[in-house]
Image: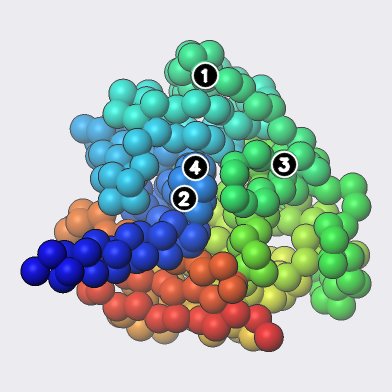
Amino acid sequence: MRALLVISLTLACASALSAAKDLQIYFIDVEGGQATLFVAPSGESMLVDTGWSGHNGRDAARIAAAAKHAGVKKIDYLVITHYHEDHVGGVPQLAAKLPIRNFVDHGESVEHGGRASELYNAYTEYRAKGTHLQVKPGDSIPIKGLDVKVITAAGAQLGQALAGAGQPNPICGQFKPHDPDTTENAQSVGTLITFGSFRAIDLGDLTWNKEYDVVCPNNRAGTVDLYIVSHHGMDASGSPALVQALHPRVALMDNGARKGGTPPAWDTIHGSPGLEDIWQLHYSVAGGKDHNSPDPFIANLDEQGDTGNWIEVTVRPDGSYTVYNSRNKYSKSYSAKP
């Protein structure tokens, strides 16, 4: 009996050690905002954005639930991509639930007055209680066990290509610019997250013309395994020039039922050479049957259900990864790049 107990404990410890070597990423449903939790093998955590304010603390509660599931008791780095309500609004409510050590952002807001100032001031009040890191392109966010490189911030982008990148982008000539964007979206902090051979990119709500500066005429970011879909899948972002340059194998869209997931954006991603799957936090009402992924790849199907299912990505040290849907327990694994 004692021998069996020792064997069981040994196996449990081996399993825990194995899990500790993985990168875990939780895409938390904040109903068309963003809240993405990275848990490094070191145990340190990085949360990108906090969802909305209000809603009886809904988004902060969902983030705290995902953190508890991951064994996270504090947020080591909170990255605020920009100061719109669906990204920064939940900071005060989250800070009441979890300690936040470091606040990462692009600096002062470019939007002033009214609700914009209220949001920014509420955020900076809590930021003052931790350590503030104002980042620029080329900086690194020092989370142990991951390489997190800032590639856009405050309207600027990398001055030179990252290692292994810099190839000419053949479809830049087809690019048609949009009207200039003077909002916080264009200021988004964009990051490239590398774990071994695995690469994921998160550009926040970076808009069309600013994306061009990252990948044209040469692709300064390189290719990725996982594309965290820009701007919730709205067609103000996610140009073919960007998506095809990134050449993702998997795309993950943090859309809401009636926010993002637009047919033009979905078509651009779906038609990208080499793409295998699009995973979505919500079924897009605007997309209909022709512009949504099959049900197993969608975390929340019912617009009125408000169930808050998340999508989890587990990345192993060899670069292989598994995507898991908490709604239906469906998962799919992807091998490492050859």
Q: Residue, x 60% and y 80% (percent of image)?
A: 336
| 65 relative position to 213: left or right | left
| 299 relative position to 156: left or right | left
Q: Residue furthest left?
A: 1
Classify 97 as above or below 147. above
Q: Secondary structure at mark 2?
A: strand
Q: 227 or 329: which is nearer to us?
A: 329
Crowding at dot 3, Cα within 10 Å, few <14 / some 14-19 / many 20+, comes out as some
Q: Residue furthest front?
A: 2
Instruction: Work out whether mark 2 precedes mark 3 in sequence or the reverse, and give the earlier one.
Output: 2
Q: CA distance from mark 2 to mark 1?
A: 20 Å
* Residue hosting label 3: 140
Q: Quadrant of the C terminus?
A: bottom right
* Residue hosting label 4: 44
Instruction: Work out whether mark 4 precedes mark 1 in sequence or the reverse, and give the earlier one.
Output: 4
* Residue hosting label 1: 130
Crowding at dot 1, Cα within 10 Å, few <14 / some 14-19 / many 20+, comes out as few
* Residue hosting label 2: 39
Q: Residue, x 36% and y 65% (percent of image)?
A: 14
Q: Secondary structure at mark 3?
A: strand
Instruction: Work out whether mark 1 precedes mark 3 in sequence or the reverse, and give the earlier one.
Output: 1
Which amino acid is tagged 2?
A: Val
| 135 relative position to 6: left or right | right
Instruction: Work out whether mark 4 precedes mark 3 in sequence or the reverse, and give the earlier one.
Output: 4
Instruction: Work out whether mark 2 precedes mark 1 in sequence or the reverse, and give the earlier one.
Output: 2
